[in-house]
Amino acid sequence: MKRLFMLLLAVSLVCACGTVEPLPGEDDKDKIENEGGDQGGDNDGSEDDGSGNEGGDQGGNEGGNEGGNTGGEGSEGEGGSGDEDVNVPGERAMIVITTASEGWCTSYPTSQSAYTIDGYEYYLLNAAIFSESNGMQFKKQTGYIANKSVFGTLVSVEVVKGGAHSGKMSLFIGDSEVPTSTEITPTETANGYLFDCTAHNAKYFKLANNSSSVVYLSEIRITYLKSGNNPEGGSGNEGGSDDGGNTGGGEGDQGGNEGGNEGEGDQGGGSTPTPDPTPDPNPSTGGVYRSGWAELPVETDNPDYYYAHHTVTDVKNSKGENARNYTVCYSANHHCPVWVAAPRHAFWTGSAGKAGYSVDPDIPSSIQPCSGADIGNSSYNRGHMLGNSDRSRSSQMRRQVSYYTNIALQHMTQFNTGGGAWNNLENHIDTFAKSDTLYMVVGSYFDAWTDKYGNSKPVSRVDFGGRDSSVPTMFWAALLRTKESAKGKAVWNCTADELRCAAFVISHAMPKGHEPAAKDMISISELEDLVGVTLFPNVPNAPKSTYKASDWGL
């Protein structure tokens, strides 16, 4: 739906205005580079590292702090006037409330009180989160949550059980706040139950525990039909950014050099984007999601693949648009990400607290591990494809990076944690994500494969939250950025001699303690042939057939 909207919009712009200039990134991070100092220390890319880059200076040269700077002229990107989340009346949307949602109280409110949870207002009574492991807790016979904000016409409310769940919730709907008259009979699901509201034209609900036992929930999924106005206040433009930067960044902007760009965006407030509850498999037609995001691979016409493009509302770029977070290609068969693509820069790091694991609302929950998912083999843990600490600037970034679509099963001590081969590679990659932006794609490989050392992991599957998930036999990382001679230059404006790109391939059977080496590297073209993914199509001059280990510190 969004892809079609953007395509039609881009066509209309071309017809009205002539040729549309190609988009130079979501305000290309190459332009953020601060000659006056990088932000902070190293990221530990390990699965549970929460340190992020909290130190350093947020400065930059020629503007970039209070008062900002006057950027270059730039040009509006493809699709630059189209709002990504335009609220089309009658279109379905979903809000997912989890234990990681912001705004939950940590003790029972003993009288009905209004709380803002993920940007929406709800009434709570005797409902709180005392422990994330137990979930959202509703006191017996009295606990409830009811919407104060109007989203649209209710379609359904689904609850996912959590913790020591014993009681059962009831749902009441109506045309006024905290309804009590019309009760909906639920149907059982694999992990909870679903209240179907389609027979009623209701806008308000009350989800209540009328049972004689405490109820614990890990998720509440509210599906509704959008009304004519946008309850979440609208998101930024999916397309469109200035190559130059903006006039006058706000106070507290995160630095940047002449030309500013996304690093000039304020870290403002916002609400959770409204996802599509039933995304179509393979929304791509075999092309690139959009121009200007240098990290994006080609999305293929594979019915096994589901794609999601995550942005956040609590961090803005220089045009006031929602900052991009990452893009994922997820396999329904393997119940595992195929690849995750993201830009890396200090712009995305900060001191936001970690979030718990949760289902990605933009990809069908039926193909993901269940919320609070256990792993059937204790030798594996949940490995972030895009590192947890790589997205520590805001709570929404933290929450999205812990979606199950960004998680793959990884050997705990041998591979993923301190001293593990993959953890050591993550630490090495971190050193290249400091000034000019590093564009990165991290992927999984599921077929039999033997590395140059003779290591080979057998093809296998493990129960992961009720899904028969594949354990990758190999993980890979494709990297692209400027050379030192082209610092601050947009990658699509660089010649091949000004760019460096390469791939690392690490067997899941690699012994602990292995440090990154030139022997682990191959060219981007060789990786494309191996894994069947076309990489960096938005950077036509990327030297994909060659690489130098010395360009990557080896």
Image (cartoon, helix red, strand yellow):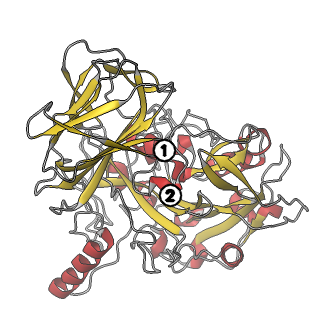
Q: Quadrant of residue 110?
A: top left
Residue type, numbered disc 1: Arg
Mark 2–mark 1 contact, CB under 8 Å?
yes
Q: Is 479 on the left or on the right of 206, as rendered?
A: right
Look at mark 2 in the image and give the residue it sits on.
342
Amino acid type, mark 2: Ala
Q: Quadrant of the N terminus?
A: bottom left
Frontmost residue, 339 versus 180: 180
Residue 432 pos. (x, y %): 61, 53
Relative placement, left or right, of 53 versus 352 is right
> According to the image, label 1 marks what residue?
391
Work out whether 111 lies above or below 150.
above
Residue 273 visible somewhere in the drawing: no
Q: Residue at x 45, y 72 (%)?
A: 282
Closer to us: 11 or 73: 11
Q: Is the residue marked by circle 1 packed among few (<14), some (14-19), or many (20+) residues within 10 Å?
A: many
Percent position of residue 97, x then y: 35, 38
